[in-house]
Image (spheres, rainbow, N blue to C red):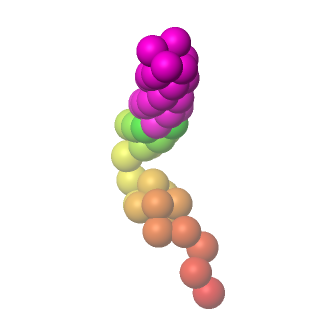
Amino acid sequence: MSLLATILVVVGLWCAVSVALACCFSAYRIWCRSDRRRSSVTRAAAVGPRR
């Protein structure tokens, strides 16, 4: 039982770390993109093409 609990904890931690890294990476890329060109273009891109 303790072995199963340990495996579950390790898998849960691995999933949490991978999700956190993916979120940080995407946020970092978005921040770099918006930091490179601070203008109305980033605002329009954030809102999205709405017609």
Residue 17 in view of the camera: no
Residue 1 locus on image (x, y percent): 49, 19
Q: Is residue 14 above or below residue 39?
A: above
Q: Residue at x 41, y 61 (%)?
A: 43
Q: Quadrant of residue 16?
A: top left
Could you tell me what secondary structure mostly forms the magenta stretch? Answer: helix
Residue 35 locus on image (x, y percent): 38, 37
Q: Residue at x 45, y 54 (%)?
A: 42
The total number of labels drawn is 0
Residue 37 locus on image (x, y percent): 44, 42
Residue extending furthest bottom? 51
Residue nearest the viewer, comparing 7 with 44 = 7
Q: Quadrant of residue 34?
A: top left
Q: Residue at x 45, y 15 (%)?
A: 2
Residue nearest the viewer, comparing 41 with 23 = 23
Residue 23 in view of the camera: yes
Q: Is residue 35 above or below residue 7?
A: below
Q: Quadrant of the C terminus?
A: bottom right
Q: Residue at x 58, y 81 (%)?
A: 50
Residue nearest the viewer, comparing 3 with 45 = 3
Q: Tell me if residue 13 is in the magenta stretch.
A: yes
Residue nearest the viewer, comparing 43 with 6 = 6
Range of magenta residues: 1-24
Residue extending furthest front? 1
